[in-house]
Every structure is written in structure tokens, then in C-alpha cells.
Image (spheres, coloured by chain):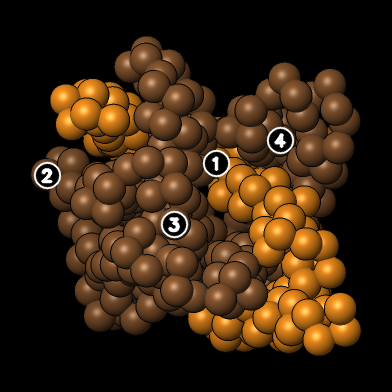
């Protein structure tokens, strides 16, 4: 059976819950930057991206220029272009042009991560299902954080913020166990990321968005050059 | 901030973010046949998630110890191939437990 809406919907639950907690902290952050609750919610509905929104709110708070907003957003979110191209290799014929115009808005790190981890081709309905709860969670979390972030004890909101990273680990580790190429690429990517994080000259001059792009491209490139993929996945792209 | 300024900056942000996702997804149609290029795009998701997670995860709760506990829980549960939800909840719970412990000790 091809991947359907229901399958996507249920897989989206984990992402949705993760987003609920992360966007909760975004809501708190946005209000503390001087935005109103509806402005925070509007940003979340229209963007569906964590790091980009945090940077965007920072620019708004600092009274930044539109050009600055465009360049910063471009750099931080450029990784989505790589994901989009990667995902086009996994879609089936239900992904018509209108379907692509709609579903491309939902390509986030987590939705992409889960979709690309599927054994079968990704369908339009599956993508819509997968995006449903994350979009709801992201919007609702922002609303709750903006309205009542201060009511929740700090220890709870802090502990919730880490959940999304746990989910990343859950996507990478099982795949790395199965394929040594993925394991090698992940390790290289982490080592590079550590260098970007802890070397002061790099940390101060390179934004986190750029660092992620560099780490990803270099490690995936090394993997592609030296550890070719097994044949098995070629059947359906 | 006045509403005019807000909507201008919001529009710039939304259009940029959307086009970054949509242009490659809508216009890139051909199947990649070159083995190396294909391998590159197959590796990209894991490369992106890895560099986003570490070391950022260690600083996600505001202090190292609870975050490290969360990371450890995530590694153990993922190694046992538990579902995304179970791993996410386990990560939060471990971080919360250590956070609480630190609060009680201090």
C-alpha cells in the first residue's frame, strides 16, 4: 500500500508534540522582543521554521531593514533547498505541480527527516498528513507561549525545549546503525559542527545557519566521494 | 513596532523562506542518475540533522547537565529503535529529572 494521509498523520504526532514545546519557547521569546501575541502566531503560521523565526524576530526587535531580513533568512534557511532537491528524488507521480506548490511550504528539518526516512515513495497525501499535526502544534505552541509563557515554571519549559533534538537523534541513529556511509557522514558532520561551535574565530564570524550548511555539504560530499551507496535503494528512487 | 513595519518585514521573511523551499521542489524534476550525486543527496538529511543536533543539544535546556542527560536518553532509546515520540518524551523526561535533582540539591 502506498503511503497515505493516515500514515503521515500518525507519524506527524511526534513532530507536532515536539513543535508544541519548541514553539512555546518561541512564543515567549517573541513577546519578550516586543511583539504582540497575534504577531507571534502570524509569524509561526506563515514561516514554519524555528531558527529562521528566532533570527527574524531579533531583526524586527532591532528595527532591522528588509534587506537584512531577506539575507539572514536566506542564509539560515538555505538548507531547505538541499532538502527540497533531496526529497524530489523520493516523490511519486501524485506530486503534481500544484501539489508541490502547496507541500513545499511544509518542508522543515523534521518533516523532511521523517519523509526521507520512508522505504516507499513519498505521496502528496502522505506529505499533507505528515504536516497536519506539526503545523497545528507549531501554531498552538506559539499562541500558548505568547499568552501564558510566564505561568509555566522555568524548569518545565526548559526541559521541553530539548525534545526536538531527541527526535533528530531518533532519525539519525537507527539509519546510521544500518548503513556505515550514513554513520561516517554523521560523525564527520558532528566533528565539523563542534569545530564551528568551539573555535572562537569561527563562532563569532559565521552564523549558525551557514555553519550547518558548510558542515552538511562537506560531510555529505566526502561520503558521496568515498563511500558509495548500496544498490538496493535504486528501485524506486 | 508599528503594524506597517511589522507586515513589511514579515512579508520579506515569508516570501524568502517559501521560495527557498518551493523553487527547488517545484522545478527540479529529473531523477538523479549519477551515483555520486545521488549519494550526496541521500546523505544530506543525516548530515544536516547531525550538525544541527550536536553540540547545540548540550545547550538546549540552559545548562549542561540536564541537556547531557537528555542526550544520553536519546542515544539509548534511539539505539533500541524506539519511535520518534518515545525518544522525544524520554529526552524531555531525563532532562527534567536532572533539572529537578539539581534544583533540590541547590
Tell me whether marks 1 and 3 sit on the same chain: no
Does residue B39 lie above or below B69 as drawn? above
Q: Which residue is mark 1?
A: B41
The answer to whether A61 appears left or right of B105 in the picture is left
Left or right: A12 in relation to B41: left
Q: Secondary structure at mark 1?
A: helix
- Residue depicted at x 23% and y 24%: B5
Between marks 1 and 3, how big is the CA–CA gap? 36 Å
Q: Around disc 1, counting alpha carbons within 10 Å, would you say few (fewer than 14), some (14 to 19), or many (20 or more)?
A: many
Q: CA distance from mark 4 to mark 2?
A: 33 Å
Q: Earlier in the sequence, mark 2 or mark 3?
A: 3
Which shade of the palette goes to chain B?
orange
Residue A87: in sight, yes or no?
A: no
Q: Is residue A198 above or below residue A167?
A: above
Please report, as a chain letter, where disc 3 is located.
A
Q: Are marks 1 and 3 in contact (CB under 8 Å)?
A: no
Q: Secondary structure at mark 3?
A: helix
Q: Quadrant of the N terminus of chain B?
A: top left
Identify the residue under disc 3: A28
Q: Which hue belongs to chain A?
A: brown
Q: Chain of mark 4?
A: A
Q: What x and y, as percent, mark residue B80?
A: 72, 85
Quadrant for the C terminus of chain B in the image: bottom right
Quadrant in the rendering for residue A153: bottom right
Marks 1, 4: nearer the viewer: 4
Q: For marks 1 and 2, give the CA distance.
A: 24 Å
Badge 4 element: helix
Q: Residues within 10 Å of mark 3 (few under 14, many from 20)?
A: many
Quickly name the residue at label 2: A98
**In front: A210, or B46?**
A210
Please state which of residues A7 and A106 is positioned toward the viewer in this rendering. A106
Amino acid at each position: 500500500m502506498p503511503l497515505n494521509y493516515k500514515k503521515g498523520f500518525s507519524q506527524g504526532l511526534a513532530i507536532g508534540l515536539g513543535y508544541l514545546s519548541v514553539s512555546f519557547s518561541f512564543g515567549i521569546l517573541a513577546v519578550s522582543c516586543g511583539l504582540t501575541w497575534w504577531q507571534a502566531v502570524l509569524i509561526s503560521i506563515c514561516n514554519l521554521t524555528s531558527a529562521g523565526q528566532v533570527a527574524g524576530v531579533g531583526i524586527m526587535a532591532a528595527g532591522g531593514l528588509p534587506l537584512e531580513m531577506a539575507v539572514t533568512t536566506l542564509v539560515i534557511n538555505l538548507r531547505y533547498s538541499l532538502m527540497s532537491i533531496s526529497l524530489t528524488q523520493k516523490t511519486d507521480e501524485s506530486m503534481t505541480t500544484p501539489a508541490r506548490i502547496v507541500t513545499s511550504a511544509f518542508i522543515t528539518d523534521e518533516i523532511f527527516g521523517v519523509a526521507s526516512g520512508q522505504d516507499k515513495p513519498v505521496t502528496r497525501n502522505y506529505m499533507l498528513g505528515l504536516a497536519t499535526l506539526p503545523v497545528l502544534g507549531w501554531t498552538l505552541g506559539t499562541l500558548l507561549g505568547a499568552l501564558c509563557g510566564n505561568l509555566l515554571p522555568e524548569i518545565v519549559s526548559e526541559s521541553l525545549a530539548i525534545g526536538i533534538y531527541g527526535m533528530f537523534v531518533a532519525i539519525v541513529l537507527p539509519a546510521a546503525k544500518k548503513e556505515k556511509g550514513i554513520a561516517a557522514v554523521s560523525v564527520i558532520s558532528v566533528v565539523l559542527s563542534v569545530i564551528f561551535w568551539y573555535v572562537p574565530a569561527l563562532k563569532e564570524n559565521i552564523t549558525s545557519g551557514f555553519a550547518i550548511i558548510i558542515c552538511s555539504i562537506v560531510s555529505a560530499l566526502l561520503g558521496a566521494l568515498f563511500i558509495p551507496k548500496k544498490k538496493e535503494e535504486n528501485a524506486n528512487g | 513596532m508599528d503594524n506597517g513595519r511589522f507586515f513589511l518585514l514579515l512579508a520579506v521573511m515569508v516570501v524568502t523562506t517559501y521560495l527557498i523551499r518551493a523553487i527547488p521542489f517545484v522545478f527540479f524534476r529529473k531523477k538523479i542518475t549519477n551515483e555520486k550525486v545521488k549519494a550526496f543527496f541521500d546523505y544530506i538529511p543525516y548530515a544536516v540533522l547531525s550538525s544541527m543536533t550536536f553540540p547545540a543539544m548540550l545547550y538546549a535546556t540552559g545548562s549542561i547537565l540536564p541537556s547531557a542527560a537528555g542526550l544520553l536518553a536519546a542515544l539509548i532509546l534511539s539505539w533500541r529503535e524506539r519511535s520518534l515520540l518515545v525518544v522525544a518524551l524520554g529526552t524531555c523526561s531525563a532532562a527534567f529529572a536532572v533539572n529537578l535533582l539539581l534544583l533540590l540539591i541547590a
